[in-house]
Amino acid sequence: MRHAIIALAVTLGACATPPAPATLTGPEWRLESIAGAAPARPSTLRFEEGRLAGRGPCNNYGGSWRMEEGRLRTGPLIATRMACPEPAMGQEAVVLRLIETGRIARLTGDRLELVGSDGTRLVARR
């Protein structure tokens, strides 16, 4: 009887549905911090299958993306070219640079963290 219970437990455990992996696609991401500081103005980012689009404090932007071994890889980003006052313009430049060159992407639930090659961190939440 004990062996039957163990076999049943193992079988049920093997049949259990694993939790869904976190994914970048879906609802919009909202910028929470850049290098530990709150953003000067709101910025958003949305990932769809193979395409990304976002709104910075000054411009809209978009491009292609894929994940490779925990790294966000983007194609060249396109963006409108509206100027706006500082610190919003500087914030946008950092965000776009991190999206284009961020080397590490950590996704935990509703939290996305991009880490640039210089260690600069961008945190966004859904």
Image (spheres, helix red, strand yellow):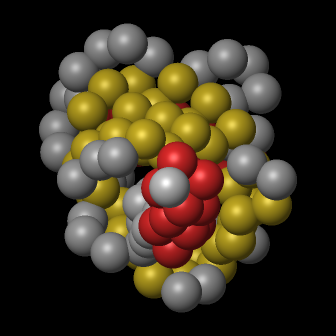
Looking at the rendered structure, the number of numbered marks drawn on it comes to 0
Left or right for 61, reference 37: right
Question: Among all residues in the image, which is located at the extreme right?
Answer: 69
Question: Among all residues in the image, which is located at the extreme left?
Answer: 41
In the image, residue 24 lies at what x, y percent?
A: 46, 64
| Residue drawn 80% across the image and 61% down it | 68
- Quadrant for residue 101, please give it: top right
Q: Is residue 113 above or below residue 70?
A: above
In the image, residue 44 lies at what x, y percent?
A: 28, 57
Left or right for 12, reference 39: right
- The answer to whether one can see residue 95 in this image is no
| Residue drawn 62% across the image and 43% down it | 105
Left or right for 21, reference 86: right
In the image, residue 60 lies at what x, y percent?
A: 35, 69
Nearer to me, 40 or 18: 18
| Residue drawn 77% across the image and 27% down it | 117
Nearer to me, 25 or 11: 11
Q: Is residue 61 above or below residue 115?
A: below
Nearer to me, 111 or 15: 15
